[in-house]
Amino acid sequence: GFPPVKKGPRHRWCEEAGAYRHPVVFFEAPHRIAQTLDILSEVVGTQRVVSVCREITKKHEELIRGPLADVVQRESIRNPVGEFTCILEPAPLETLHEDVGEPRLLEEFDRMTNIGLERRAAMSQVARLFHVRTRDVFDAVERRKARAEGDE
């Protein structure tokens, strides 16, 4: 499908898409393609590989593949015409933290909130750091909160 139109939800969508351990296929409108790729660059890093197909299955089809930093500079992205189908490749395996447990997520979340980060921002940062979904961090924080309330 399409990423959300509004900037806040679009940013959260990009964070989640970047955390998946499989390729993410999505469509984008020409007037939003540059903005979406810029947000993805900010969230997942400029070296993450993306494939952008313009006017796929049509006479003037174009395929651009490479690191986000290179793709966002292309003329057909900066001055887009036509429909776009994008494939965001997963993070390289060596950067994924498969064995990250809930205690480690919570430890990092606590560290970030103790230095003044707001709850939502800390969850996003932890998710990005450990290549997990923001929802996974949220669930871990809520489980801890429920356990603490049950002990009282």
Image (cartoon, rainbow, N blue to C red):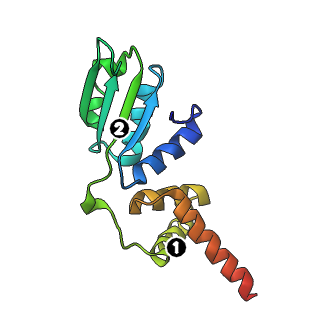
Amino acid bearing label 2: Ile
Binning the other alpha carbons within 10 Å of mark 1 as few (below 14), some (14 to 19) or many (20 upward) gives some
Residue 103, how many percent across, how many down?
Answer: 49, 78
Tell me the quarter of the image containing the C terminus.
bottom right
Residue 99, how many percent across, how many down?
Answer: 36, 73
Q: Earlier in the sequence, mark 2 or mark 1?
A: 2
Amino acid bearing label 1: Leu
Real-space Cα distance between discs 2 and 1?
Answer: 31 Å
Give the residue displayed 24% in from the left and 62% down from the top: 94
Q: Is residue 143 left or right of residue 17?
A: right
Residue with the most extreme top position: 59
Give the residue displayed 40% in from the left and 59% down from the top: 131
Which residue is disc 1 drawn over?
106
The disc placed on residue 38 is none
Q: How many marks?
A: 2
Give the residue displayed 53% in from the left and 38% down from the top: 10
Binning the other alpha carbons within 10 Å of mark 2 as few (below 14), some (14 to 19) or many (20 upward) gives some
The disc placed on residue 87 is 2
Q: Is residue 33 left or right of residue 134?
A: left
Mark 2 lies on a secondary structure that is strand
